[in-house]
Amino acid sequence: MQVSESPAGTVRGIIDTNRYMVLATADRTGLPWSSPVYFAHREYRELFWLSSPRATHSRNIEVRPQVGIAVFDSSVRIGTGQGVYMSAVARAVAGPDVEDTIEVFSRRSLWHGGMAWTADDVGDTAGLRLYRAVAHEHWILAKDGSPDHRIPVHLT
């Protein structure tokens, strides 16, 4: 990933160049759970992934839709990494939204050498569902010498 001079450019670059995000959820009692998932995005605020509705993170989203998300490149040298951190609200995509949103996911899947996806692949009789998280806040690490000091980023 090329380093951008603007925080918003950094967010866009990290989200565009990485294939996996870490999704942090919690159950009804607050017990945390994190899962790496392949994702697609729309305008850096809507993030989409496929999961079994029986997966722990999917069950957690049913009872507590507030999630945390991190996207980062784990292959860089220690001390040089940069990530995007987001607060979001997640849910399974249903109804008429499935057609539009599965197209976003399918396009990125094909771009990365994966398969094409359709609404039938994530319908009621399928073993997978399409999920969407809408991020309402983005942060990146401030490179000011302070450890783990995050700054908010406003995307325009």
Image (cartoon, grey):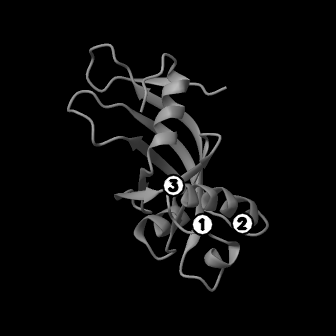
Q: How many marks?
A: 3
In this view, the residue in front, 29 or 25, is 25
Amino acid carrying label 3: it is: Phe
The alpha-carbon separation of the residues under discs 1 and 2 comes to 8 Å
Amino acid carrying label 1: it is: Leu
Q: Dividing the picture into quarters, in which one does residue 31 lie?
A: bottom left
In this view, the residue in front, 115 or 145, is 115
Q: Quadrant of the C terminus?
A: top right
Q: Residue furthest top?
A: 144
Q: Which mark is residue 39?
A: 3
Q: Which mark is residue 130?
A: 1
Q: Please report contact status of discs 3 and 1: CB closer than 8 Å, yes or no.
A: no
Q: Which residue is mark 2?
A: 98
Residue 86 visible to an observer of this rendering:
no
Local packing at callout 3 (Cα closer than 10 Å; few below 14, some 14-19, many 20+) is: many
**Dot 2: what SS?**
helix
Closer to the chain start, of discs 3 and 2, is 3
Q: Residue at x 56, y 55 (%)?
A: 111
Amino acid carrying label 2: it is: Val
